[in-house]
Image: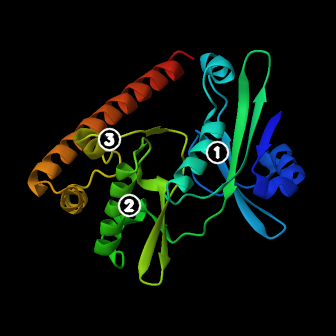
């Protein structure tokens, strides 16, 4: 087992190893479906979020051992990069990787727990949520700041931005960090980066209107492009979901 702990939390190393050894005994703290498992754990009054990544397929086990950083390591490193850029995200605590002679078997990423009020998903599900307009405006400005600083968050989806209310202001924190690109974003990349967020056309219109002001472009043009990327993404997503469902049904029919 390989473990890397940030300097701030070196005194927690033994506790972290114990948590990993006993990980299955903790209750799931977040609904992540079947992909990964995320649990909230408190050590000596300090609360952490521990994410266990699903065991990779055989090919990826080899890739993560020899050619590419694991999701856990990337999450750890990207968090540090974001904080250096002045972008809020829960600070990294540690990452753990377990390899065998073939490749990566499992990995864990641990970060500080940030108490939050809502995620972006709430803005989708509750259009009458208090101060909805201002939160959407703040979120759009937050995304603009990402783009200006050369961050393309590839998993910019509803559950991956935590929203924290402080007095009458809102702070936005990125989570689920293992898929990112860094570098200057062009106009098309910027608008495409909003595609995963919501199927609700009225909400996309609000985001587009706010973003158009920030990049000094025509609001109608920005919306049309943003909505086009949105439709393309969700059409592909629905098709992939349909194919997986068909294959799964055939698998059970053959039993």
Could you tell me if residue 128 is visible in this image? Answer: no
Work out how far the residue at label 2 is from the one at label 1, CA to CA, in angstroms: 21 Å
Q: Are marks 2 and 3 in contact (CB under 8 Å)?
A: no
x, y percentage for residue 57?
Answer: 62, 22
Relative to 44, does residue 147 appear above or below in the rendering? above
> 21 and 141: which one is in front?
141
Residue at the spot of label 2: 142
x, y percentage for residue 229?
Answer: 24, 40
Work out how far the residue at label 3 is from the one at label 1, CA to CA, in angstroms: 23 Å
Q: Earlier in the sequence, mark 3 or mark 1?
A: 1
Mark 1: give few (<14), some (14-19) or many (20+) Cα within 10 Å.
many
x, y percentage for residue 17?
Answer: 85, 46
Q: Earlier in the sequence, mark 2 or mark 3?
A: 2
**Quadrant in which residue 49 is drawn:** bottom right
Task: Report the side of 37 relative to 142 (left or right).
Answer: right
Check disc 1 and report its element: helix, strand or loop: helix
Numbered tag placed on residue 76 in the rendering? 1
Work out how far the residue at label 2 is from the one at label 3, CA to CA, in angstroms: 15 Å
Residue at (40%, 50%) from the top-left corner?
A: 149
Check disc 3 and report its element: helix, strand or loop: loop
Q: Quadrant of the C terminus?
A: top right
> 20 and 34: which one is in front?
20
Check disc 2 and report its element: helix, strand or loop: helix
Residue at the spot of label 3: 185
Q: Quadrant of the N terminus?
A: top right
Q: Nearer the viewer, mark 2 or mark 3?
A: 3
x, y percentage for residue 191?
Answer: 26, 46
> 148 and 17: which one is in front?
148
Q: Earlier in the sequence, mark 2 or mark 1?
A: 1
Residue at (43%, 73%) from the top-left corner?
A: 170
């Amino acid at each position: 087992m390989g473990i890397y702990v940030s300097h701030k939390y070196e005194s927690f190393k033994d506790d972290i190893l114990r948590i990993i050894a006993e990980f299955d005994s903790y209750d799931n703290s977040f609904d992540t479906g079947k992909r990964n498992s995320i649990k909230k754990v408190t050590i000596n009054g300090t609360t952490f979020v521990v994410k266990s990544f699903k065991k990779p397929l055989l090919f990826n086990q080899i890739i993560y051992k020899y050619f590419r950083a694991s999701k856990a390591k990337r999450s750890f490193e990207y968090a540090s990069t974001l904080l250096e850029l002045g972008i809020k995200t829960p600070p990294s605590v540690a990452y753990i990787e377990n390899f065998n002679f073939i490749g990566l078997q499992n990995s864990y990423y641990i970060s500080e727990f940030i108490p939050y009020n809502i995620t972006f998903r709430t803005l989708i599900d509750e259009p009458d949520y208090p101060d909805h307009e201002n939160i959407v405006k703040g979120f759009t400005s937050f995304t603009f700041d990402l783009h200006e600083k050369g961050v393309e968050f590839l998993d910019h989806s509803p559950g991956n931005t935590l929203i924290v209310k402080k007095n009458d202001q809102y702070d936005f924190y990125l989570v689920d960090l293992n898929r990112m690109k860094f570098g200057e974003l062009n106009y098309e990349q910027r608008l495409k980066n909003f595609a995963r967020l919501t199927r609700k056309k009225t909400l996309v219109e609000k985001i587009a209107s706010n973003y158009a002001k920030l990049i000094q472009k025509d609001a109608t043009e920005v919306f049309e492009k943003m909505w086009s990327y949105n439709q393309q993404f969700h059409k592909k997503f629905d098709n992939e979901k349909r194919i997986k469902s068909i294959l799964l049904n055939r698998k059970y029919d053959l039993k």
